[in-house]
Amino acid sequence: MKALLETEIQKRLEQFEGWEYSDNAIHTAFEFENFKEAFTSMTRIAFEAEDLDHHPDWSNVYNKLHISLSTHDAGGVTEKDFELASRIDGLLS
């Protein structure tokens, strides 16, 4: 899978509310009611990531979850990242 050009990434991001492109990855953040809700959401995302065999760079502090997606093997953002972003949005919308 090849990395997308920045123009392609920006065009695709028009369909994704709350996601942005920087540092060769797409990023988003969520704030939940509490840690339990954040961790539950991370668990749900983990099942989708495993299904795609594509795993996010993420961090969690209490009720906040920060997610960065990039395909390291391709050296940038690929369709795989947008597929996982779409699944994440579907789970958390």
Image (cartoon, rainbow, N blue to C red):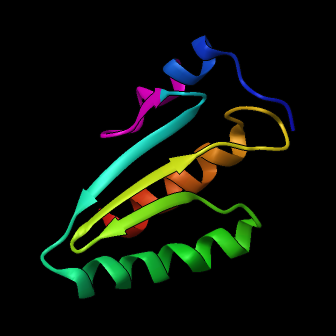
| Quadrant of the snapshot with the N terminus | top right
Q: Which residues are magenta?
A: 11-21
Q: Nearer the viewer, residue 5 or 72?
A: 72
Residue 19 shown in magenta: yes
Q: Is residue 19 left or right of residue 75?
A: left
Residue 17 shown in magenta: yes
Q: Choose top left, top right, bottom left or bottom right for residue 35.
A: bottom left
Q: Is residue 8 left or right of residue 2?
A: left
Identify the residue at horizontal 58%, vertical 47% (top origin): 69
Q: Position of residue 8 (x, y in %)?
A: 62, 18
Q: Choose top left, top right, bottom left or bottom right for residue 64.
A: bottom left
Q: Position of residue 66 (x, y in %)?
A: 37, 55
Q: Position of residue 55 (x, y in %)?
A: 66, 63
Identify the residue at horizontal 77%, vertical 44% (top origin): 72
Identify the residue at horizontal 63%, vertical 46% (top origin): 81
Q: Position of residue 3 (x, y in %)?
A: 77, 28
Q: Is residue 33 left or right of residue 80?
A: left
In the image, farthest residue toward the front: 61
